[in-house]
Image (cartoon, coloured by chain):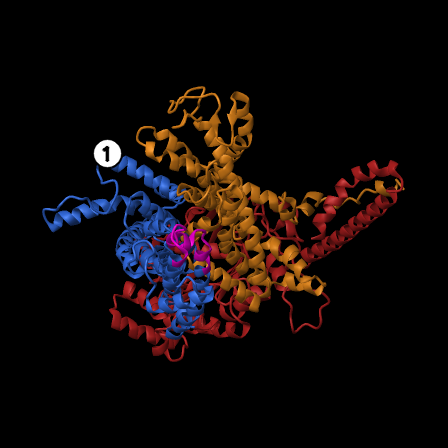
Chain colours: A orange, B blue, C red
Amino acid sequence: MSTSSQVMPPSLPEEENIDELLTLTPQLARKRRSQFRIIVDRFTRNRLAVAGFFVLALMGLAALLAPLLYHATATYDPSTYINLRESPAFQVPSWQHLLGTDDVGRDEMARILYGGRVSLLIGLSSMFMAIFVGVTIGALAGYFGGIVDNLLMRVTDIILAIPLYLLLFVLSASFSNGSIFSVVLLIALFGWTYTARLVRSEFLALKEREFVMAARTLGASNLRLMVRHILPNAAGPIIVSATLLVGANIITESILSFFGFGIQVPLASWGTMVSDAKDYFLTHPILALSPGICILLVVLSFNLMGDGLRDALDPYLTER
Amino acid sequence: MGRYIIRRLLQAIPLLFLVSIVVFSLIHLIPGGAEAVFLNPRLSGAARAAIAHNLGLDQPIVVQYLLWIKGAITGNFGNSFVDGQTVISDVSARVGPTVELFGSALIFALILAIPLGITSAVRQYSIVDYTITFFSYFGISMPIFFFALIMQELFAVKLGWLPDYGRSSDATYASSFDYVLDYLLHLILPMIVLSLAFMASWSRYTRASMLDVKRQDYMRTAQSKGVGPIPILARHGLRNALIPVLTVVALDFGAIAGGAAVTETIFAWPGLGSFFIESLTGRDYPVLMAMLLMSAVVVIFFNLVADVLYGVLDPRIRYN
Amino acid sequence: MGKLLEITNLKTYFRTREGWVHAVDGVSFSIDQGEKLGIVGESGCGKSVTALSIMRLIPHPPGETLDGSILFGEQDLLEISESAMRKIRGKQIGMIFQDPLTSLNPVLTIGYQITEVLKLHMGLDTQQAKRRAIELLREVGIPEAERRINSYPHQFSGGMRQRVMIAIALACRPQLIIADEPTTALDVTVQAQILELINSISSEYNSAVMLITHDLGVVAGMTDRVVVMYAGHVIEMAPTDELFANPRHPYTLGLLASIPRLDIGRQEELTPIEGAPPDLLHPPQGCPFMPRCIFATNQCKAPPPLRAVGNNHVAACWYDVNQPAEQQRAATRREARAHHLAMLDATAQAILASSQDSRAAPDSDESAASSSDGPATVTKAGED
C-alpha cells in the first residue's frame, strides 16, 4: 500500500524541466479569489463606502447600548426620556449632559440615542418588510407574466399615481396611532413599489436564460426555480436598493414625525426632536442641529454604502 | 408615435377610475369625518338629519361615490367643508403659488444639475468632480425640513438678508417693480430649499450617464474621424447621455402634484402642499379627495410625457 | 511606391493595479503606399493596440505609448501635437472598427456621420457633402442611397452598417485604411462581400490597407504581405504566398496546422497549439513563444531577433524549423513529452487509488499526503 504512494515521476530529458510544464498555464498558477472575496475587496477599495459602513456601525452600536449607558448613569425613564433627577432646562453641554438639556430639562444626548433607536429601528424594519413584499410581488409578476403581471402592475401603478407624501399623510391620519409598528407598516406599504419594479425586470430577463431552462428540464418546480435559481442572480440589485431604501425610509419617517403624522408622544424619534426644537433654533441651535445632523449622517452613510455595494457587485467590472 | 400616445391615454382612464375608488375609500376611512365636522352632537336629531340629507351623507356609500365621480368628471368637486366655497375655487387659489415655487425650483435645479453632472464626468477624478459628487451626496441625504430650517434661520432670521416666510410682505408698494422684487426675495429661499434634492439627484444621474456614454465605441469612432473634443462631447456624447436623464427629469416633474408640503409649511407659502395639510387637519373631505385625484392626473400625465419624450429623443424607439 | 508608414520599436503598455501590461512590446514593421498588409495573431497579441497606437487613440489613464516612432510620410505621429493628429485622423488615415453596431452613433443619422468628415476635412458645404455622401453610399453598395442617407444605424443590417463604416473611413480618400477585424462580427456569407468591398475600393483610391484579423483565411485572399504577431511582438513577416507555403516560425506553423482543412482527407484530431498565451503582466524573458514551443531549447532564453530567412521574409526564431533535422528533433520531443504526461497521469491515478485504499488504513495517510504535492500540481497544469 505505501509503495504505490512512493512512486516518483520519471525524469525528463535535460533540456526540459518541470517549471516549463508549469508555465503552460500561467492563469492557473495565479491565485484565485472566491467571488465573495472579490466583492469584499472591491467594496473596501471605496473609502467613502467603508467610512459610511463604520459610521453606521458606530451609530448602531451607540443606539443599541443606549439603555446601558443611561441606566447606569442616571435614574431615567426611557418612555419620556426625562431624567428623574430634575435638571434645569437649556443647559449647555457639559460632562454631565454631553449635549446639554432641552426645553424640559431632558438630557439631549440620551434623547438622541433613544431617538436613534426609534429612527433606525423604523428605517430597518420598514426596509425588510418592503423588500420582502417587493421581491415577492416583483418575482411573481416577472416570472409568471401575463395576467398575474398585469394585475400586480396595475396595483403598483395605482399606488404610484398618488404622490407618496399626500398618501402617507392621509393614511397616518386614518390608521396610525403613533406607535413604531404602525409607522413601520405605513412606510413599508409604499416602499415596496420600487423594489417590485426592479425585481420584476430582473426576473423577466433572467427567466429566459439557459440555466433556468436547464433547471426546469431537471424537474425543478416553479417555486424552486424562483427562489433557488433566479433570485440569487438578482440579489445584487436587490441588496443595493435595500441599502438605499433604509436611508429613504429614515427620511420619510423623519418628515412624517416632523409634521406629527408619524411617531407621537411619548415616543420620540429624531424627526420629532427637530420639530420640538425648531422654535428654539436661534437661541439653542444644538437642540435642533444634533438630531438633524444625525439623520443626515445616517442617511449619507447608507447612501455611500449603497453606492459602494452597487460598484462592488457590478457584473460589468472585470476581475481587476 | 401618435397611436402610442392615444393608446397610453386610453390606458390611463381605467387607471384613474381605480385611483378614484381608492382615493374615495381612503378619505372616508379617516376617523372623524363629515359627521364630526357638521353633525355636532349637540344639535337635535332632526337638524342633524336635515344637514346629513343636504350633504348627501344619508345615501349609501356607493351612491355617494358615483355622485362624486360624476361631478368630478365635469370639474365639480362640491363645496369645501371648511369655508363653503367650491372646492375648485379654493384649490385654484392655491395652485398658482405652488406652480411658481415648484416650477422655479425644478427649472433652477435643471439649469444647474446638467452642467454640473457633465463637468463632473468630463473631469472625472479631479477636485471638481469630487466636490460636485460630495455635494450631491449631501443633497440627496439631507432631510428637506432640516435644510429648510437651517436656511431659514441662517439667511432670514440671523442674517436678515431675506424674508423668513410668506409670499409677500404686508407693506404697500411704491411701484409694481417693488412688488415683483419683494416677491422674488420671498421666493428665493424656499426655491433653493426645494431644488436641492432634485439638483443633487439629477447631477448624479447626468454624471453617471455621461460616464457611460464616454466608454462607448462610437465615441472612439468619432475620435478616429478627427472630430475635436468639444463637438465630440456636445454632438456625439450629450445627445445620447441626456436621453435617460431627461426622462427621469420628466418623471420627477410629476412630483409637482404632491406639492411641496414641507417647504410650503415651513416658509408659510400659500400653496397646495400647505393647503393639503390644513385640509387634512380640518377634515375637509371634498378638498382632500379632489386634490388627491387631481394630483394623480398630474402624475399620470407626466409619466406619459416621460415616455413620449423617450420616444422622441431616441431614434431607436421612434422608428420601430 | 515608397514607404507610407514606418513603425519602429513601438511600445505601448497599460497601467494596472498589479503593474504594467506589455500589450505591444517592441513592434516594428512598415507599409508601402498602396500595399495591403495583413496583421495576424490571436486575441491579446497586441494587433488592435498597435492599430490604436498608430491613430493615437489609446485611452490615456490606463494606456501609454512609451517608446518608438511611427513615421507617416515625414512626420512622427508620436511626436506631433494632438491638433495636428486630428487633421490626419479621418483624412489621411481612416479606420474601420470591428463592431459596426456599437461603433456607429445611434442617435445620429448615417448621413450626418458621413458628412461630418467631409465638412471637417474637405471643407465641403452641406449640400456638397450630402451629394458626396450619397455617392459614397452607392459606391459601398447601399441601395436607395438618397433615402437611406437619413436613416439611423439601427435601421440597417450588420453588413450594411459595416459598409457605412467603410464609407465613412474612405470618404476623404485616405492614404491608409486600418481595418480592425472588420468581418469578425458579421455573418460568414457577408464577410466575403465586405472584404471584397474593402479590396476594390482601396485599390480604386490607391489607399494602403492594414487588415487586422485573427483569421488566416481572411488574409489569404486579400493581402500582399503578412505580419504575424504574438504576445506583443512581431514574430514573422513575409509576402502572403510565401508565408503560407514556407512558414518559418513555430507559432505560424502551429497556426497553419490548426486550421481544419477540406482538401486533406479526414484527420483524426485537430492539432491545436498546446498551452495558452503568456501573462503580459510579467512577460517571460527570451522568446515569448518558448513555453509552448516544441522546438525550444535553453538557447531560446535569449530573445531571438527577426532574422532573414528568405526573400523579404523574416522570422524571430533561432532555428530553421523547415529543416528535416529540426523537425525530427521536434517530433522526438513531442513523443517524449506525450510519454511523460502519460506517466504523470498514471502516477496520479495510482496515488488516487492508494489514497482511497488508505482511507481504511489511516497510518499511511501522511505519506500519501506529502508525496502527492509534487505530481498532483504538475498534473493539473498538464491537463490543460
Badge 1 element: loop
Which sits in the foreground, A2 or A232?
Answer: A232
Provide the residue span drawn in magenta.
B25-46
In the picture, measured across the screen, residue B18 lies left or right of residue C289, that is left
Residue lying farthest to the bottom in this orientation:
C144
Q: Residues within 10 Å of mark 1 (few under 14, many from 20)?
A: few
Residue at label 1?
Answer: B159
Let me know if residue C354 is in the magenta part. Answer: no
Which sits in the foreground, A245 or A161?
Answer: A161
Q: Residue at left 63%, top 66%?
A: C259
Does the rendering let one see residue C51?
Answer: no
In the picture shown, does residue A318 fall above or below A288?
below
- Return the chain for callout 1: B
Which sits in the foreground, B232 or B199?
Answer: B199
Residue B5 placement: quadrant: bottom left
Which amino acid type is shown beneath numbered disc 1? Leu
In the picture, measured across the screen, residue A171 lies left or right of residue C256, that is left
